[in-house]
Amino acid sequence: MRIPLLDLVRQYRQLQGEIDPAMKAVLEKGAYILGENVAKFEEEAAAYCGTKYAVGVANGTDALELAIKALGIGSGDEVITTPFTFIATTEAICLNGAKPVLVDIEPDTFNIDAASIEKAVTSRTKAVIPVHLFGQACDMDTVMSVAKKRGIRVIEDCAQAIGAGFKSKRVGGFGDFGCFSFFPSKNLGCFGDGGMVTTNDKTLAGKIKMLRAHGQAGGYRHETEGRNSRLDEIQAAVLRIKLRHLDGWNNSRRKNAGSYNRLFEEMGKKGGLSLPVEKSGRKHVYNIYNIRSGGRDKLRESLTAKDIATAVYYPIPLHLQPVYSGLGWKKGDFPVSEKACEEVLALPVFPEMEEEEVRFVSRGVIDFLEGKH
């Protein structure tokens, strides 16, 4: 049995009857940039996230970069975030001329250790970017408390967590901005690149709209230097359809994650294997289902031999990436992140998986742990 990490074709086949006519309608109308689907998607996505405004942009990295720029953060400023995330988070900070300041993660959720954020605040700190990693919200009570106390901005990196909840609220509505990615592998993915910025501030929403269109305030009047970062009409049409299915897909991901947890327990989970933890008061949407094993690399080889796809998110923490060698970080600076990079392994958890497939993957993991590979 071949188990892919993600099956986008399977998903498309299920939605083909909805998606094909929607894409055809865009083609027949001939309006491809900032058309009615973009406007409607922004309204629908804002309502879904529980925010007043949503602005479609070209991708999740741009969402972060434009959010930082809109807050006037630049040279000489510092932005706090985590070393255990995709490089887009720190990339967006550096591309604005600011300096990333890192705080280690919680070992069970992989999210930033919110209790340690305040210790990293200096007179130059302008913002913190909590990353809702793998589909679980950070401790936003603590993040927002520190931000209010120290007078710093909050930009939520929601790239992997659309639909995830903290207490009674969805991610993307806590801070000044929420930044989303619609890369195809995300819980809500388009047919290419796409992104979105959410906010409850009308002025900030206007700044993002201006920045995504070359800093244009209208009629070729440019108030600042922006960029070309518009969500296109065809992608918006696809996202509008997929948004209607998102809660169902997230629930399926949660069901598959629950099945993994149950099966690992039923099959006699062996020592050395740690399962994902969902903190109380949070709704985890499992963009990624990450187990931890001290024998990660050999386990992965064993699963590959059984035609089970896996991935490592992430093999190298950001502070040890070659691109940041000039910032003075060294091995040992963030030990929890470094250990996670050595142990994490993502198993397939996509919503279209059948129970039989989840069981097959679980059996493959247990066989390895029992020495049957």
Image (tube, grey):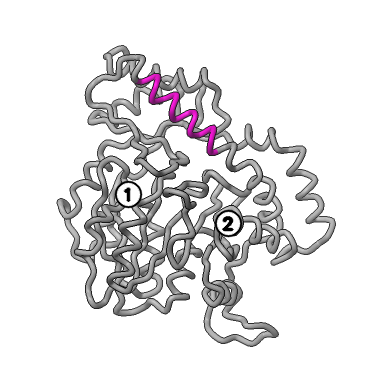
Q: Of callouts 2 and 1, which one flags the residue occurring earlier in the amino acid sequence?
A: 1
Q: Residue furthest right?
A: 28
- State whether residue 227 is above or below residue 298: below
Residue 194's label in the rendered image is 2
Is the stretch drawn in magenta largely helix, strand or loop? Answer: helix
Q: Which residue is mark 1?
A: 111
Q: Quadrant of residue 151?
A: bottom left
One can see residue 161 in this view: yes
For the residue pair 129 and 347, the one nearer the viewer reads as 129
Q: Is 176 or 371 nearer to us in this picture?
A: 176
Range drawn in magenta: 250-264
Please tell me in which quadrant of the rendered image residue 281 appears. Answer: top left
Residue at figure coordinates x 27%, y 14% from the top left: 371
Amino acid carrying label 1: it is Asn
**Secondary element at tag 2:** loop
Q: Is residue 227 visible?
A: no
